Image: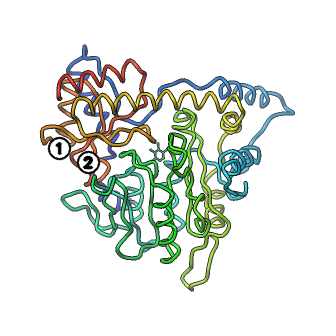
Amino acid sequence: MARINDHYQKLAAGYLFPEIGRRVSAFQTANPKADVIRLGIGDVVLPLTASVRQAMHDAVDEMAVASGFKGYGPERGYAFLREAIAKHDFGDRGVAIDPNEIFVSDGSKCDSGNIQEIFAEDATIAIPDPVYPVYVDTNVMAGRTGQAGANGRYSGIQYLPCTEASGFLPALPNRPVDLVYLCSPNNPTGAVASKAELTKWVDWARANGAILLFDAAYERFITDPELPRSIFEVPGARECAIEFRSYSKTAGFTGIRCAYVVIPAELKGRNARGESVSVAGLWDRRTSTKFNGVSYPVQRAAEAIYSETGCKEVQANIDYYMANAGIIRAGLAKAGFYTFGGVNAPYVWMKTPNGLDSWQFFDALLSQANVVGTPGSGFGSCGEGYLRLSAFGFREKVEEAVGRITKHFA
Ligand SMILES: *Cc1c(COP(=O)(O)O)cnc(C)c1O
């Protein structure tokens, strides 16, 4: 038998969302008449916008004639999309990003999971707790950790607790590390770092020679104009940060697949001889070796959200989801639950009632209210005692879910 990568066997029971899926389908099999409302997995529900659909159709038509046919495209994305990103996502907001600093991909899950490959096997890492599980799991797979302890934490990772007392924001690491993952707006808590907060991180990273891996998958959901949408709004971030953006939640692309990474030209790492090496150069090398680019129709679809109409359509969908978030937050708060988030992020973070742990409340909610949430403990040990509710649902379902939770648990 061939030897496997033993690090995979360190991974805790399974990825969070498949486990939720198993429990929900077991419940549905046992209760076929139950009308289950899913506010668990953070997946969008609204259909593609008209501009996106049209752009994809046009791109397919273009490729269906010899003169417009396209085979492999540039690994890092077509210039038309990288230029649109640089202009609309950054330039228009006063942030100078060159199109050549942008790498278009098929998702931020892959990007935020793959980025660790270009750093040393023994690079040290800090990760907020709770957070999107991909950062921890991919470092476990790469062998940067020991075994998981009883609380699910792996030795070798510096966890940054995000608790109610700190407004669910991570404190600076207490010892130097090479890499720090940050996610703002945060999945699952909905906490968003202010400009002062991000400045603190950038200053710390520069002083300590660390790189910040900044996941901004939810930046479009920020409603407060004072809050930063990009880490590159902070002076000095170009020397110490990588940013991940995704069209998944922004434009309903979870099934279409498009995202991008920004790696500034100034960002450097060091090799074994202590020489400085361009991080973008390494990512470019990795990308051209392991990836053959996002499909042309998809890149045209992504470009379409930057037109005036395209932008309005996408904003209307975001407003719809954020109105859902407001309904969840206000409804649960009125019923006496402790809630956080849901203002600048499409997630509401609620404390479990009656001293239940996260999975106990998940099961009770499923069996009594037929509502699916996401157990906070699945995002890290500091998520224990919380449940994440997603605003990605149809209005009537969201309202119904809030009514049921209140009826059964308030
Ligand atoms: C949904 C999500 C992503 C996006 O993943 P895609 O692969 O682009 O669909 C990235 N980061 C976080 C924190 C997310 O919640």
Question: Residue 377 shows which numbered tag?
Answer: 2
Residue 242 coordinates in the image, percent (x, y):
56, 61
The one nearer the camera, 13 or 199, is: 199
Outermost residue toward the left in this view: 354
Occupied quadrant, residue 272: bottom right
Q: Is residue 370 left or right of residue 78?
A: left
Q: Is residue 378 above or below residue 403?
A: below
Give the crowd class for mark 2: few <14, some 14-19, many >=20 residues within 10 Å: many
Q: CA distance from mark 1 to mark 2?
A: 8 Å
Residue 7 coordinates in the image, percent (x, y):
35, 62
Q: Which residue is mark 1?
A: 357
Residue at point 22%, 25% (across, down): 406
The one nearer the camera, 35 or 116, is: 35
Outermost residue toward the right in this view: 67
For the question of whether residue 4 can be seen, the reply is: no
Q: Secondary structure at mark 2?
A: helix
For the question of whether residue 388 can be seen, the reply is: yes
**Quadrant including the N terminus:** bottom left
